[in-house]
Image: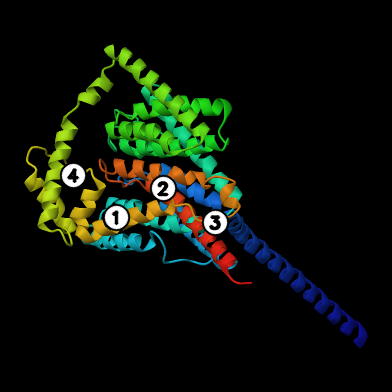
């Protein structure tokens, strides 16, 4: 009588244990699946940080800094920083705090941060702070950690060519009044941004659009030199770029573009670059001539050349800003006092908000000689990044940003700095693009110095 009871009890215990084991296995597998599902996207991002970097730049392209808009760009920047730092820790990549550009940029970043803290809280103020100082500082350092191989650098080059094509087509659509083809639609919204009557692109500012077109055009010239851009695409680029520049209706952009096309052949010894500049010059002359011949019905270009109102307003701003700088040349004016002081000094114009329309003057008035000295230091370091190292790695001779590109780098800086004399460079894509290239050049220079040091060591 006892055995059946014992046998029944054991069977019940076994079944209960089996059920518990099955439940534990299901729980464990579900946990593993959840962990893997969470880790796989992170692993993908860690494996391909260049795609994340390019995606972040693409988001910044469509985020005007002085307009209340979606904050997807800030999220993208935060994710990019997190992923690149995790990857650097995993691969034991050195995180360099000192080096060219870093120290003066850190000083400007600190000054601007203190200045924006003193201003009344406005999302636009923090957005402009990020666009002017934080984004270029971060992208400069992350670029050297991300774009370290041929594949990633080629992706970056293709991205810039694609952006050039998009901005050129958008400007041409605006020029021929094919506005239904312009995307995104906020570009046509006259209630936001500036220069709604010009080809301003997603920047909502014609100068920023023109500077970007000019910078990317020079990069496309280098791609043509290396035969990465050829055939029908190269011809379309040479025709579309002058038309897109013309559509910005901005005299500073026109002047910088003409100077870069005329002077680059004198510096470059490459036949393809000289030929491309000659073709662009011909298409520019033909395009300008055609539009001025047709200007009997549309006088916008003639009116733009003769327009004096913006010049007079800017001259008034320059005079007032210079006088303010002379009064407080060391540390500059407090953030809260600049607008009232400008309103007191300028009586002929009454805009809702005074802009200096000059990057250097704004820095001098806001941060004094200290800020201006730091900015000059940044500029000098940027030019020095283009100096050809004594020994380049094999990678640096084979693709984008090679040794020959360093002859074009000063032209990129000159275009940026010249236009900064007529607008405050508060456009995060423009700043991010320039400092990304600078970060890659700095990384190449470090690698070449390491190679040179290694070769100089006694065996």
Displayed quadrant of residue 99: bottom left
Mark in front: 2 vs 1: 1
Q: Which quadrant is home to the N terminus?
A: bottom right
In the drawing, what numbered circle is on residue 240? Answer: none
Mark in front: 2 vs 4: 2
Question: How far, Cα to Cα, is label 4 from label 1?
Answer: 27 Å
Instruction: Identify which residue is drawn at 43% across, 30% down.
Output: 168
Mark in front: 4 vs 1: 1
Q: Counting residues from the N terminus, which is met first, the one under dot 4 or under dot 1?
A: 4
Q: Mark 1 points at which residue?
A: 376
Q: Counting residues from the N terminus, which is met first, the one under dot 3 or under dot 4?
A: 4
Q: Mark 4 points at which residue?
A: 353
Residue 343 in the image: above or below residue 370: above
Instruction: Identify which residue is drawn at 85% across, 77% down.
Output: 11
Question: How far, Cα to Cα, is label 2 from label 1?
Answer: 16 Å
Q: Is residue 189 visible?
A: no
Q: Name the residue under label 2.
A: 434
Question: How far, Cα to Cα, is label 2 from label 4?
Answer: 28 Å
The front one of 348 and 454 is 454
Callout 2 crowding tier (Cα within 10 Å): few <14, some 14–19, many ≥20: many
Q: Mark 3 points at which residue?
A: 391
Question: How far, Cα to Cα, is label 3 from label 1?
Answer: 28 Å
What is the secondary structure assignment of the residue under circle 1? helix
The front one of 122 and 167 is 167
Question: How far, Cα to Cα, is label 3 from label 4?
Answer: 51 Å
Displayed quadrant of residue 227: top right
What is the secondary structure assignment of the residue under circle 4? loop
């Amino acid at each position: 009588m006892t055995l059946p009871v014992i046998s029944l009890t054991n069977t019940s215990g076994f079944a209960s244990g089996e059920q518990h084991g099955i439940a534990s296995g299901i729980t464990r597998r579900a946990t593993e699946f959840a962990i893997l599902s969470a880790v796989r996207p992170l692993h993908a991002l860690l494996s391909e940080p260049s795609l994340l970097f390019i995606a972040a730049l693409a988001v910044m392209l469509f985020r005007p800094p002085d307009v209340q808009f979606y904050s997807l760009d800030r999220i993208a920047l935060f994710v990019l920083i997190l992923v690149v730092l995790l990857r650097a820790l995993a691969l034991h990549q050195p995180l360099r705090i000192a080096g060219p550009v870093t120290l003066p940029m850190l000083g400007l970043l600190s000054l601007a941060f203190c200045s924006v803290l003193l201003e009344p809280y406005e999302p636009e103020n923090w957005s402009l702070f990020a666009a002017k100082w934080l984004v270029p500082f971060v992208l400069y350092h992350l670029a050297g950690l991300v774009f370290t191989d041929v594949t990633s650098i080629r992706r970056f080059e293709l991205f810039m060519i694609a952006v050039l094509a998009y901005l050129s087509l958008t400007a041409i659509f605006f020029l021929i009044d094919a506005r239904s083809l312009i995307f995104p639609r906020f570009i046509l919204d006259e209630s936001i941004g500036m220069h709604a009557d010009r080809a301003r692109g997603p920047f909502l500012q014609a100068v920023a659009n023109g500077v970007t077109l000019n910078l990317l055009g020079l990069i496309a010239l280098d791609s043509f030199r290396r035969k990465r851009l050829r055939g029908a695409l190269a011809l379309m680029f040479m025709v579309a770029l002058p038309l897109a520049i013309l559509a910005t209706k901005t005299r500073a952009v026109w002047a910088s573009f003409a100077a870069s096309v005329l002077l680059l052949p004198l510096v470059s010894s490459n036949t393809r670059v000289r030929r491309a500049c000659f073709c662009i010059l011909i298409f520019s002359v033909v395009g300008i001539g055609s539009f001025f011949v047709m200007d009997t019905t549309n006088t916008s270009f003639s009116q733009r050349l003769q327009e004096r109102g913006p010049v007079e307003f800017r001259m008034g701003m320059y005079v007032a800003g210079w006088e303010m700088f002379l009064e407080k040349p060391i540390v500059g004016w407090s953030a809260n006092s600049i607008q009232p002081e400008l309103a007191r000094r300028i009586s002929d114009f009454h805009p809702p908000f005074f802009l200096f329309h000059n990057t250097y003057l704004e820095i001098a008035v806001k941060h004094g000689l200290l800020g201006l000295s730091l900015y000059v230091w940044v500029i000098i370091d940027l030019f020095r990044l283009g100096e050809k190292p004594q020994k380049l790695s094999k990678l640096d001779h084979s693709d984008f940003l090679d040794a020959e590109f360093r002859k074009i780098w000063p032209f990129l800086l000159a275009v940026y700095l010249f236009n900064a004399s007529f607008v405050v460079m508060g456009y995060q894509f423009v700043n991010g693009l320039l400092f990304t290239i600078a970060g890659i050049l700095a990384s190449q220079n470090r690698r070449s110095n390491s190679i040179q040091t290694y070769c100089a060591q006694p065996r």
